[in-house]
């Protein structure tokens, strides 16, 4: 097993000499073009109280194995790039501290229910195309620019009807945790369904009929069993499960 | 192909421990639904033996009076009670009842749909099923 030895001269903040704890990082390596199965590579890395899972993956990439494929950008739970399975559960690597895992072994694998591109990087093609299919934009005939008012005013209460759903960063964790997604390759999925709700609940939008028609499909909203795992793993408080059940309320006629 | 698409597959259903009580309820609902379906088919098969005369019917009935028969019936009672009670919760939830109201999300972002009302209903469904099974055991083995 390769080990990072702490050196003061290192630029990387992980490797300061005062570091006392270390964990074993196990990274799933898989290249669909050349490999038939995934293999795990192990590294011993020093950690601090504040060290995140993304920190140690990047430390390994910098010092020990530059070939590790991982997608990240903002490092602050804003871009939605670094979703992966951490010790068996989908989470953002940049938003998960080693200290909260309560384990000396940190296993990182690609998210389930997404095709693997390589190692930890997965393919979002279907995810984004499904998101787009749900018309994730305000639908109406006039626009803010052409009207006299310049902008469509909303009360704080009207904003709160959809605000939490607009926090979605398209990280895909919900789709990866969803038990329907686990077996149904064409299920719309919690992310896109929650976005359908986000726009329907927006009082500037007139696209409710269009979107309800799209989700009222054999692989649409009725495949949700309200297992709640999407909301359990969502890092932004979107609560897709709530959005989906409220959407179903429209279709069943319980809501107007 | 399966490996590349990395779907979790049936394994995802069978491993409910990672995502809280609601996922356990989902798993139990599926398990009891399928269990009841198997029981229902067996039940139709069993009762249809009456068309073969009184003798055949009696023989079938004796099966339920064995220790194994009692245990299976007790499990069926438990499955029935959980599936019904949790089914009512799920139907209400899926119609948008009791799943909370959208609001301003604040850290640490507790999802309102996974609220204590639903958790309590799940626990009550499990508790009721356990009580019913104990009562069933007492009646079946009590004579
Ligand atoms: C009053 C009694 C019952 C109620 C209230 C009820 C309710 C429900 C509900 C709401 C679901 C959907 C759960 C979900 O969305 O995940 C369901 C699923 C199911 N039920 Fe029932 N049910 C009842 C009796 C039965 C009986 C007697 C059987 C068997 C003959 C049965 C077999 C099933 C099966 C196989 C499923 C599918 C399980 C799944 O998809 O996970 N149910 N039931
Ligand atoms: S709903 Fe939450 S978990 Fe799903 S993609 Fe959006 S931010 Fe990620
Ligand atoms: S790196 Fe942007 S969300 Fe983690």
Image (tube, coloured by chain):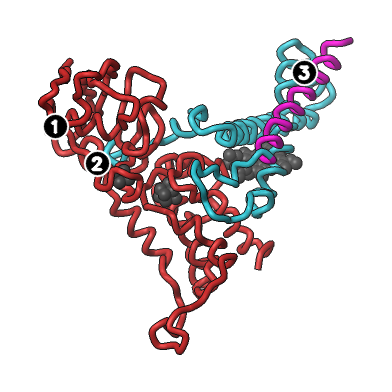
Chain colours: A red, B cyan
- What percent of the width, then of the height, locates residue A190? 47, 50
* Residue for point 38% across, 52% down: A169
> Mark 3 belongs to which subunit?
B
- What percent of the width, then of the height, locates residue A110? 30, 36
Label 2, on which residue? A121
Quick one: SS at disc 3? Answer: loop
Q: Nearer the viewer, residue A193 or A44?
A: A44
Q: Is residue B48 above or below residue A73?
A: above
State left or right for residue B47 relative to residue A220.
right
Task: Give how far apart the Cα atoms at labels 3 and 1 are.
Answer: 74 Å
Task: Give how far apart the Cα atoms at labels 2 and 1 are.
Answer: 26 Å
Task: Classify mark 1: residues with Cα within 10 Å, few (<14), some (14-19) or many (20+).
Answer: few
The residue segment tinted magenta is B117-143
Task: Classify mark 3: residues with Cα within 10 Å, few (<14), some (14-19) or many (20+).
Answer: some
Which label lies toward us, 2 or 3?
2
> Mark 1 belongs to which subunit?
A
Q: Nearer the viewer, residue A40 or A60?
A: A60
Residue A10 among magenta residues? no
- What percent of the width, then of the height, locates residue A59? 19, 30
Q: Nearer the viewer, residue A70 or B108?
A: B108
State left or right for residue A252 relative to residue B69.
left
> Mark 2 belongs to which subunit?
A
* Residue for point 51% across, 27% down: B17
Task: Give how far apart the Cα atoms at labels 2 and 3 are.
Answer: 55 Å
**Contact? badges 2 and 1 (CB < 8 Å):** no
- What percent of the width, then of the height, locates residue A95? 36, 38
Task: Classify mark 2: residues with Cα within 10 Å, few (<14), some (14-19) or many (20+).
Answer: many
Q: Quadrant of the N terminus of chain B?
A: top left
Label 3, on which residue? B64
Marker disc for residue A11: 1
Q: Is residue B97 above or below residue B29?
A: below
């Amino acid at each position: 097993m390769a080990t990072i030895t702490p050196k003061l001269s290192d630029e990387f903040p992980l490797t300061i000499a005062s570091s006392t704890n270390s964990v074993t990082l196990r990274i799933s390596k898989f290249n669909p073009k050349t490999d038939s199965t995934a293999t795990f590579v192990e590294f011993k890395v020093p950690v601090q109280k504040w060290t995140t899972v993304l920190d140690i993956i990047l430390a390994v990439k910098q010092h020990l194995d530059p070939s590790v494929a991982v997608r990240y950008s903002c490092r602050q739970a804003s871009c939605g790039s670094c979703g992966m399975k951490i010790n068996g559960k989908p989470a953002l690597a940049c938003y998960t501290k080693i200290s909260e895992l309560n384990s000396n072994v940190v296993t990182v694998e690609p998210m389930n229910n997404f095709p693997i591109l390589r190692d930890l990087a997965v393919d979002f093609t279907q995810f984004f195309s499904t998101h787009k299919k749900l018309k994730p934009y305000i639908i109406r005939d006039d626009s803010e620019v052409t009207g006299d008012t310049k902008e469509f005013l909303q009360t704080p209460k009207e904003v709160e009807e959809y605000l939490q759903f607009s926090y979605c960063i398209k990280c895909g964790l919900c789709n990866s945790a969803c038990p329907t997604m686990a077996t149904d390759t064409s299920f719309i999925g919690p992310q896109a369904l929650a976005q359908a709700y986000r726009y329907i609940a927006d009082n500037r939008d007139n696209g409710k009929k269009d979107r309800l028609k799209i989700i009222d499909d054999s692989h649409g909203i009725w495949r949700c069993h309200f297992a709640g795992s999407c909301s359990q793993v969502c890092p932004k408080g979107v609560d897709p499960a709530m959005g989906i059940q409220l959407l179903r309320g429209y279709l069943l006629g319980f809501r107007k | 192909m399966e490996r590349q698409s990395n779907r979790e597959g049936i394994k995802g259903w069978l491993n409910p421990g990672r995502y809280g009580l609601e996922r356990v309820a989902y798993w139990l609902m599926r398990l009891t639904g399928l269990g009841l379906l198997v029981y229902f088919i067996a039940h139709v098969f069993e009762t249809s033996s009456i068309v073969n005369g009184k003798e055949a019917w009696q023989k079938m009935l004796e099966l339920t009076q064995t220790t194994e028969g009692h245990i299976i019936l007790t499990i069926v009672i438990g499955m029935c009670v959980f599936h019904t009670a949790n089914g009512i919760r799920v139907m209400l939830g899926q119609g948008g009842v009791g799943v909370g109201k959208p609001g301003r999300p604040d850290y640490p972002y507790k999802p309102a749909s996974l609220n204590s009302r639903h958790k309590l209903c799940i626990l009550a469904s499990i508790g009721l099923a356990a009580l019913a099974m104990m009562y069933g055991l007492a009646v079946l083995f009590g004579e």
